[in-house]
Structure formats: structure tokens, C-alpha cells
Amino acid sequence: MRHGTSPAPATGSGPAPSASRLAAAQIIGTTIEWYDFFIYGTASALVFHHVFFPDLPPLVGTLLALATFGAGFLARPLGAVVFGHFGDRVGRKRTLVATLLLMGGATVAVGLLPSYATIGAAAPLLLLLLRIVQGMAVGGEWGGAALIGIEHAEPRRKTLFGAFAQLGSPLGLILATVVFLGITAGSETWVQGWGWRIPFLASVLLIPIGLVIRTKIHESPDFRAGERDGAPRRLPVAEVLRADWRRVLIGVGAFAGVFVTYYLLTTFTLVYATGTLGMSTSLSLPANLVAAVSEGLFVLVGAFLAPRFTARRVAIVSAVGLLLWAWPAFALVGTADPGLLYLAVAVSMAFVGAGYGVLAAEVALLFRPEVRYTGASLCYGVAGSLGGIAPSLSTYLLDRFGTTTPVAVLTGAVAVLMTAACVALPRSAADGTPRAAAPADAPAAAG
């Protein structure tokens, strides 16, 4: 069911980049992208209902702020199609540069937006538009960041290099949370006036760092080989949906449990802890630091366990763990005890991290190199959309039923879907060498 392995770098493409340079390009680039994305999520939970929806009841304002947060996720599949097209036809490297510039520009623009008090209804509409731009950028970012490492790596190290791209998520969350902790130390009036803008405007300092690193990386060997063989497709998304739709379903299902749990524990939990349980931001916001550290640690744990037990088995254990831990996690959060809140988040994100780390390579390698950027990005983007609407849906369920039990049921149901999808992943040897042959409906494997 997998397609191909990485060939040697194409003649004339320059020497293969060092492992450390590849890892740096993946980690630093995705950290900057995810920092931009996460500061919006944090601001949505804590600030935006005051700034952009001040005339509405607090819960309604929070729901609308989270809805703009979710809009970025709904835009991810569109970004996957648009940037996947260019990633498969023009190249991984140039597409990554474009997504970085798009994300950085949108983030800085959010920091410059006038408030509702200044320009009225135009303010939340512009906020929504910029969030959609952010979502498109992330929809195109992940596929290239993962592939630039996976397609350079030898078979035994593909899972590890896929995991490097995943480290940008916890590191970006740490950076965003630390910045917001510093901002919220000021007065509430200052935070709602100008303080919240600082994390967004600071992105202008990070963009050049990502650009310098990414422009020094060579194009991936798989893409170079496809250029020589004339493999790039005129419309990659059409071919993916025609020939590889089963793989898309597997990839979406595998990522779904990871994303839903992630955003419930990092965004919805903030809303629930501060708005319903009455916990202060100084107590609830550090839960995101706990989440990031736990996720980042277990991204690496999962990647290092994969060569011994196979990435597929690691992903299945992660999915089952999310299912079994769903109800205890929200029960602990509901105690309003900071220590139990941190415990609930730490264990949940351990399961998330282990699955997230190994799934980058597992999902990417479901697709042939000539449509891989589009196929992998589409899986990631659609699953991300499901995760993005989860905080808004869960906030509604909390208001409707007055308890987090329906939220726990939702989390468990998506974990069941993830478990089934991970079981459907192709079996591979512990060293990452494919065992399963391509199915009859797929073109022959490249390489």
C-alpha cells in the first residue's frame, strides 16, 4: 500500500544536506508557523471576545471568537489543494517559502487590526478573513515541511525525520504560551487594548529566520527524480481523489483523534477553566506549557520506538490510549484543581504526541511521490478541520448540557475512528521497509 522509497539526490542538485540542517529546517520553520497559529487560538480563548465582540454576552462572544479560530481549520483543505498542487509541480522548497510568507504576513496584519470599538462590524470580518489566510498557509505548510525531511531520509530514518516536522507544534505552543503569560501579567485594560497585539507583531521578527533556513535546503530527491521522469501530474488533487481516495480516508481518520484531542486540551480547556470553573489565567494557561512539553517529549519517544515495534503499532497504542483516557481526562479537569488539570493534559498529550510523531511518515508514504504533497496535505488538512471545530462544538455542548460528559464522549468517538484508521495502515517492517504491495487500483510504485 506504500509507494516508493527515496532515491539518491539527483545529479546536479548539489550535495545531500546534513541531518542537522534538515532537522533545523523542519523544526524551526514549523515552530514559527505554529507560533503564528497558536497565538490566535490563545487570543481567541482569552481576549478576542472583548476586542471584537464586546456587545455580546460573554459566552456568545467566546463562541464567535472560537468560530473565527475554527474558520482557519476549515480553510486548511483549500490550502492543501492549492499549495499541494504547487508542491507537487513546482517543488517542496519554493512552496514552503510561500507558505511561510503568507502565514507571517497574515499574523502581523491581525496585530494591526482596529478593534470593534473603532470600525464596528468590519473588525471581526477582517479578523475572519485573516484567519482564513492563516488556515490556508498551514494547510500547505505541513506537507512540505514533513516531505523535505522524509524524502531525504533513508528508509530506517523516515519516521524520525517526519517527527522533526511535528516538533514545531509543541515548540510553537510553548513560545506562544510564554509570550501570552508575559502579556497577561499586565492589567486587563492594557491587555485588551494593546497588549494582545504584541505576540502578533513579534512575528515580523521571526519570518526572516525561517526564510534564511529554508532557502538553504536542497529540493527533495523524490521530487527531483519525478522531474527527470516527467512524473508531475497536471492536476494532482484530481488524481489523488480518483486513485488514492481510500488512502485519504485512512490518513484523515488516523490524524483525526490526534487533532480533536489536541485542540480540546489546549483551547477548549482554557475556555472551560477560566469561564466556567473560574480559574485564573495564571493557573490555567500553564496547562498549555505542560501540554507542549508532554507532546514534544512523546513525539520523540514514539519516533524512537517505531523502528523496534513499527510505527503502525505505536499509532494504534496511541489511539487506544486516547479512547481509554477520554473520560478520566475531563473528569480531572472538572475538579478545578490545577495539579489535576496539568495531569489530565500531560497524559492526554503523551498519547497525542506518540501518535502525531509517527503518523507524519506513515501518512505521507501512503502516496506516490508525484502526488505526495497533495495527498498528505489533504489528509492533514481535513483532519485538522475536524480538530478545529471541536472547541466551538464542545463549548456549545458544555452550555447545552452543563457538563463535560458529552465532550468526553465526542473525544472517545473520534479516538475509535483513529484506532480503526491506524489498524488499516499498511504493515511495514521495523526498519520502515514496506511489506504490503500497492493495491490494484493504484499505479505502480515509484522507485
Image: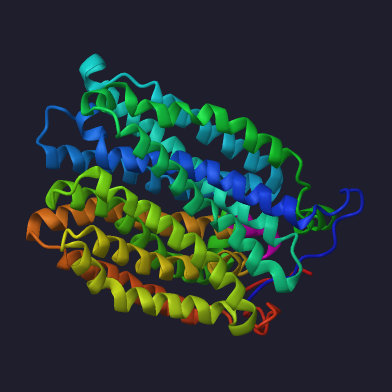
- In the rendered image, residue 370 lying in the magenta stretch gets the answer yes
Q: Which residues are magenta?
A: 368-374
- Is 130 positioned to the left or the right of 363 in the image? left
Q: How many marks?
A: 0
Q: Position of residue 353 (x, y in %)?
A: 47, 65
Q: Is residue 248 visible?
A: no
Residue 399 vs residue 265, the one in the foreground: 265
Residue at the farthest right position? 11
Q: Is residue 306 above or below residue 137?
A: below
- Is 151 positioned to the left or the right of 17 in the image? left
Residue drawn at (19%, 60%), measured in percent from left and top? 337
Q: Position of residue 386 (x, y in %)?
A: 35, 58
Residue 130 vs residue 229, the one in the foreground: 130
- Is 407 positioned to the left or the right of 23 in the image? left
Q: Position of residue 391 (x, y in %)?
A: 27, 53
Q: Main secondary structure of the magenta part?
A: helix
| Quadrant, the C terminus | bottom right
- In the rendered image, residue 84 lying in the magenta stretch gets the answer no
Q: State the image quarter where residue 320 is shown.
A: bottom left
Residue drawn at (26%, 62%), measured in percent from left and top? 339
Residue 332 vs residue 10, the one in the foreground: 332
Q: Position of residue 78 (x, y in %)?
A: 47, 46
Residue drawn at (76%, 41%), measured in percent from left and top? 216
